[in-house]
Amino acid sequence: MKFFIDTANLDEIKEANDLGVLDGVTTNPSLMAKEGITGEVNIIQHYIDICQIVDGPISAEVIATDYEGIVREGEHLASLHKNIVVKVPMIAEGIKAIKYFSSKGIKTNCTLIFSAGQALLAAKAGATYISPFLGRLDDISTNGLDLIAQIRLIYDNYSFETQILAASVRHPMHIINCAEIGSDVATVPLKAIKALLNHPLTTSGLETFLADHAKGNS
Ligand code: G3P
């Protein structure tokens, strides 16, 4: 399973990249705003900065919601760097735009997926990735992981090449469960990636090894 980091924070992106296990980055307008990145010029520069840190797919989201606007914005974003993936919302105009981008060889990530039907439509339009939001389904007492499993089954039934990019991943068990189900990608906050490192038996075991080594060498 590929690991993307879900943030627009350059320090966090660098830290995850330095760990050596990062495959890509996802952003969205809320994550950009959280970092205080506003205005078209700054937003565009920020995407370029991210592309210079990570050599992998970088999702950049369009703001337009009409077909012509999505196509115009998406083509501009795609022209910034070969690794840009145009992130398009799951709306009718977005599906039409994904079909167009797919015919032009522009990679897309269909975002705000909350049902298997939406995932099926996005795959038929030729989306490169779809982003089902696990945590936000969990927030409304619906099992987000069940949706990932349902989409996995449907995509496998028809050999769709669209990749499942589990999003709104909140904690390490989401990551493990996504890997068990066979999600192609999980995009996660740095905190959740780092949480995978920890186990109390690793910590205590290492302490013992180092203490025993010190005793033997004193
Ligand atoms: O990848 C989508 C993500 O940024 C949304 O996460 O935690 O706001 O639901 P969250």
Image (spheres, rainbow, N blue to C red):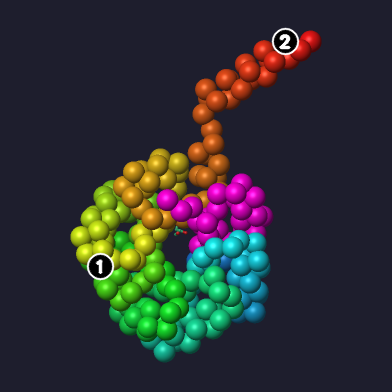
Q: Is residue 26 left or right of residue 36?
A: left
Q: Secondary structure at mark 2?
A: helix
Q: Could one spot residue 91 in this view of the protein? A: no
Marked residue nearer the N-terminal end (2 or 1): 1
Which of the four quarters of the rendered structure image does ligand 1 lie in?
A: bottom left
Cα separation between marks 2 and 1: 62 Å
Across and down, in percent, residue 132 comes to: 35, 59
Indicate whether 147 appears above or below 41.
above
In this orientation, which residue lies closer to the viewer: 184 or 192?
184
Camera-nearest label, 2 or 1: 2
Specify whether residue 3 is painted magenta: yes
Which amino acid, mark 2? Gly
Across and down, in percent, residue 116 comes to: 24, 62
Q: Which residue is mark 2?
A: 216
Q: Which residue is mark 1?
A: 120
In this orientation, which residue lies closer to the viewer: 67 or 212?
212
Which amino acid, mark 1? Leu
Q: Give the magenta range.
A: 1-27
- Please state the total of marks drawn on the protein image: 2
Residue displayed at 50% across by 44% down: 192
